[in-house]
Amino acid sequence: MATAGTEIKVTPEIAAEHGVTRDEYARIQQILGRDPNITELGIFSVMWSEHCSYKSSKVHLKRLPTRGKLVVQGPGENAGVVDIGDGLVAAFKIESHNHPSYVEPFQGATTGVGGILRDIFTMGARPIAILDSLRFGEISPVKGTSAEDAAKNRRILDGVVRGVGHYGNCFGVPTIGGEVGFEPCYSQNPLVNALALGIARKEEIFLAKAKGIGNPVIYVGAKTGRDGIHGASLLASAEFTEESKQKRPNVQVGDPFMEKLLLEACLEAMQTGAVVAIQDMGAAGLTCSTMEMASRGGTGIEIDLAKVPQRETGMTPYEIMLSESQERMLLVAEKGREREVLDVFKKWGLDAVVVGTVTDGGIAKVLNHGQIAAEIPAHPLAEEGPVYRRPIAQPPLRHETPADWFLFAPEGTNLTANFAKLLATPAIASKRWITEQYDTSVRTNTLAGPGASDAAVVRIKDPETGIVKRALALATDGNGRWCQLNPRAGAMHAVAEAARNVASSGARPIAATNCLNFGSPEKPDVMWQFSEAIDGLTVACEELGTPITGGNVSFYNETLGKSIYPTPVIGILGILDDASRVLKIAFRAEGDVILLLEGAEAIARAQHAAPLEGKHPSETARGFSSSEYSKTIAGIVSGEPPAIDLAAEKRLIDCLVALASEGSLQSAHDISDGGIAVTLAESCFASASSPAGARHAEPVLGATVKLDAAGAPAEHALFNESGARCVVSASPTKLAAVQRTARQYNVGAREIGKVHLGNALRIEYKGSAVVDSPLDSLRGIWANSLENTLAAK
Amino acid sequence: MKFGVVVFPGSNCDHDAFYAIGNVLHKPVEFIWHQSEDLANCDAIILPGGFAHGDYLRTGAIARFSPVMKSVEKFANSGGMVLGICNGFQILLEAGLLPGAMMRNSGLRYICRHVHIRVEQTDTPFTNAAQRGQILTVPIAHNDGNYTSDEATLAGLEKNRQVLFRYTTPHGPDDAAGNPNGSMNNIAGICNRERNIAGLMPHPERAVETALGSDDGLVIFKSMVEALVGAAKASA
C-alpha cells in the first residue's frame, strides 16, 4: 500500500528501541496482518506503553471497588463523576507527573497541573479546585542525605512549587490543599501528584466517545510542535538512569493562559449543543485522543495530518501523531453544525480546524496530504493491548529485634525540646511558604484553604443562580514510609486518614481517586507491594463507602535500580449538606472543653487499653518505630505502621459528620503525623492565624491537657500516630450534646483539657508536665522552619 | 445603575467581581467582552484580576490595546467611574489612566494571603462609605504588585491625596511591616487626580462574605453604589 513516511523500515530491533517487546511486536503484526510502518509502530508503542495501557496494573486494578449509588462515571473516562445533589455532579481525578518533574521541575509540575485540569473540563465540568500531593528527598542534610543532595532537593521543590503555582494561579483555579512529604527515597525521583475538582450540571457531562458516522472531527487549541514526543512511553514508562537528563526535550512545556482560553472556549462550545464528544490530548497526544475516541464509540476515524495546525515545518506523521504539545483538544461535532463550534473558538482566538471525520468500520486512518500514513483497527489497538500478570514475590520478612526499635525515654523526662524538634521537621512544620505561592482564594469559594481545616473545603455556587447550599471537602493522603513497612496496612491508612480528614471538616466522604506511585513492575517485590496496596485500598474503600472513580498508575519510579517507597496517594471527596457547618482546626474560645474522640474506644475500651498495657514494651516500640517522631528524634524507621481498625474509623467518621451537622463543635483536628501533641499545638497555632483572628487581635488561645494511658510511655502517649482519633473542642454548654452523640455512634469522647487564654501549651502526662512551653516560641519554630531551611543555599 | 465587568482573554476574577456585585450586593451587572467598544450603558466599569493576554510581555501591556480600552478611556475621561483590581490596576497603569508602574514583588515570588490595608481617603466614589483610617482585611494574590513611580509622581500622589489604600499591620501603625511586595510608600491602591479612576492590588471582591474569611471588601463596592445613587439624585 502507499504510505507516507515509510523511509525507515521497521524491524523488531527498531520496535525494541520503542519499548515494544518481541511478543508485542508479533501481536502488532497479527492485528495489522502485516508489518507496521514507522508511524504505526510509534502509535502502537505509545498506546501500549505502561503509562497509557496499564498493562502491568490492569489485572490488579480490577479488584478495586468502583461502584456506588452516587457514582455517575467510574474509571475509564477522563475523570470520575459523582452526584452531589440538586442536579449537580462533581468530576475529580488525581494524576502523577513524577518523571518530568525530576527532569525539569517547573515545566514538569505545570504540565502535570495542566493535564489534570484538562481532564476535568473535558468532561464539561468547570474546575474549581486543585490539590497537590508532593514528595521530595530530604531538604536538609540528614542521615543518608548529603548537603549536595539536600541542596538539589530544595531546588526541585522550589521549581515544582513555582510550577504548580504558576499554572493554577494563571488559569484561575485555587490550589487549596494536598500534602508534602520528605523521605530520602524521593531524592532521585520526586512525586508530583495533582488532583483537580470540577462541577457541572448532571445532564451536561461530556464523554469521549466518537459517535455519528460522518460527523466532523475538530482539532482545537495550541499548535502541534516537536515537544514531548514519547513523553509517556519513554519518560513515564522506564526507570531513570544517568542518561535521563538527556530526556529533557521529552518534557512538555505548559501555557496556562492558552489553557484558560481553551477552558472558556470548550465550555462555551459545549453550550451550543453541537459538540458530540470531546477528548483532551494529554499523554500520547493526537494518537491517544483519536484512537480512544473511536474505540470507545465503536466507530472508525479518519484524519488528515496536513490539516493539523503545526508550530514547526517539516514535521513527519510520526512526529505529529506522537507530539505531546500541551493545551490541545479533539472534539467531534454534529455534522452541519461545525460552524457554531468553530465560531466559539475563533472568538477566543484559538485554532480550530476540521481535521477529519467519524467513519464506519472501526478503522483509524491517518492521512498525510491524502496519502495513508497509518491504518489501524482502533478497538484492538486501544482495548486489546498486552496485559501482563507480572511475577509477584513477597520480599523476605524483616527480622527485627528490639534493638532496631525506638527506645522510649524514662518516665518523667521533659519532652519539650524533642517536641520543638518535631515541630521543625519539614513534614510537620507549617507549609505556609509553599501555600502562599498558590492562589487559594480565586473563584471566591474557599471556605477552608491550606491548614485551616483537615480537608480543603469549597462551597458550591449553583452555576446559574449563584445560590450556595452545599460544600465539597477534599483531602489527599499517602504514607510511603508505612507502605514500605507494610503496603497493605499503609494503603488502608491512606484511605482512612484521607476520609478522616474529610470528616474532620464536617463532610461525609463519598468517593475516592487514587494515584499509585511505585517502582518497576518488572520487579516481583514491587509487584507484591502493588498487589498488597490494591488489596488494602479495596478493603478500606469498601469499608468506608468511598468507591474509586479514577486515577492513575505511575510505575518505574526508580533511579539507578533503586525504587521509591511504594506510595499510593488517595484523594477523598466529601460533601457537606450545609456549607455553613464547616469545621476548622482552630481553637475558638476561652473555656472550651477539649475532647479526644476515639473510634476504637467505646466498644472496645477494655480491649483497646488492655493490649497496650499488657503488651510487651517492645511491641509498643515496634508500632511506634514507624512514626515521624521516631524518624526525627532517633533516626529510626522500622517496625510496623500502627494497627488499623477500619470499623473504628467508620464510627469516628460517622460521628464527626453528625456532630458537624448538629453544630455542636467549635473545632476538630484529627490525630496523624506527630501524634496528639502536634494536633493540639496546631489547633492553638491556628487560633491566631485566621484573618479575622489577626485583625481583631483576639487574645492568643492556649491549652492545658492531661493525658493518661496506663502502661504506655509518655512519648508513646504524645506522639503515636494510631488512627481513628480526633481532637475536638466544644463550648461547655454543648458538652453533654457532644457526649450524647458520641455514645450514639459508639465513639469514646473523653475530656482531656481546656482552651485557655494565654501564651502557653501544657501537656501533662500522669500528673507531671511533659510539654510546657510558651506558645509563641513553639509557633515560631513551626511557622518558620520550612522557610528557613529553603532559604539555605 | 449598572456595573460592567470587562472580560479580557485570561481574566480570571471576572466571575468573582460579577458575583460580588450581582449576588452579594444585588445590583445589576454584566460582562463586557474585550473586543466590544460598546460599554452597554454601564455606570461603573470594573477591570478584573487575572492574567489578561497571559501577562505576556508585561502585566497589562497587551490588554491596554484591546478594543474595549478605547471606550473605557473615553468613559473615564468624561468622569465615568472605573475600578481596576489587581491585573485591572496593572492595565490602568499601562493604559496611562493611572500614574506609575508595577514591578515584580520584592521577594520575587507570587504571594497569596490576607493583608491589612488602611483607608487613607474617603472623598472618592470608591471609599466614601469607609472611615478614614479604617483597616480592611483583604486578600492579595499577585506576582507584580510592587508599585513604583518616579519621585515627582510619588510626591504628586501624596500631595493630591491620591493614595487610597496603604498596606499596614493589623492595628497599624508600622506600615512597612505589613507591606507584602515592597511597593513605594506602602501603596496598595491609588486614584487619579479627578478621583474617578482607581486601582488596587488587593482583591475586595474576594472579601465580601464572612464565610470567605472577611467581608471588609464590601465597603468599596458599597461606596461605588452610594456614589452612583448620589449621582443619579443629583442629575434628577
Image: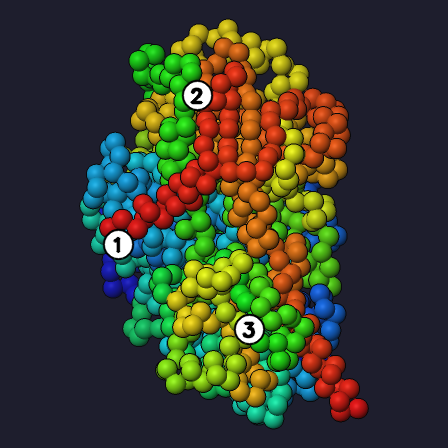
Q: Are marks 3 and 1 in contact (CB under 8 Å)?
A: no
Q: Alpha carbon of mark 3 to alpha carbon of mark 1: how far?
A: 55 Å
Letter of the chain that mark 2 sits on in the rendering: A
Q: Nearer the viewer, residue A123 or A663?
A: A663
Residue B106 image point, x, y percent: 36, 65
| Other residues around mark 2 within 10 Å, as few (<14) / some (14–19) / many (≥20) | many
Mark 3 surroundings: few (<14), some (14-19) or many (≥20) residues within 10 A: many
**Are circles 2 and 3 on residues that touch, CB within 8 Å?**
no
Q: Residue at 57% of width from left, 64% of height from top?
A: B135
Tell me the amino acid under the disc marked 1. Lys
Q: Which residue is mark 1?
A: A247
Image mark 3: chain = B
Residue A156 x/y as whole percent: 31, 50
Residue A715 is marked as 2
**Which type of secondary structure does the marked residue at label 1 adopt?**
helix
Instruction: Tell me the residue that label 3 is attached to.
Output: B120
What label does residue A88 carry, if any?
A: none
Q: Nearer the viewer, mark 3 or mark 1?
A: 3
Residue at (71%, 77%) from the top-left corner? B226
Name the amino acid type tagged 2: Glu
Q: Secondary structure at mark 3?
A: loop
> What subunit carries mark 1?
A
Q: Residues within 10 Å of mark 1 (few under 14, many from 20)?
A: some
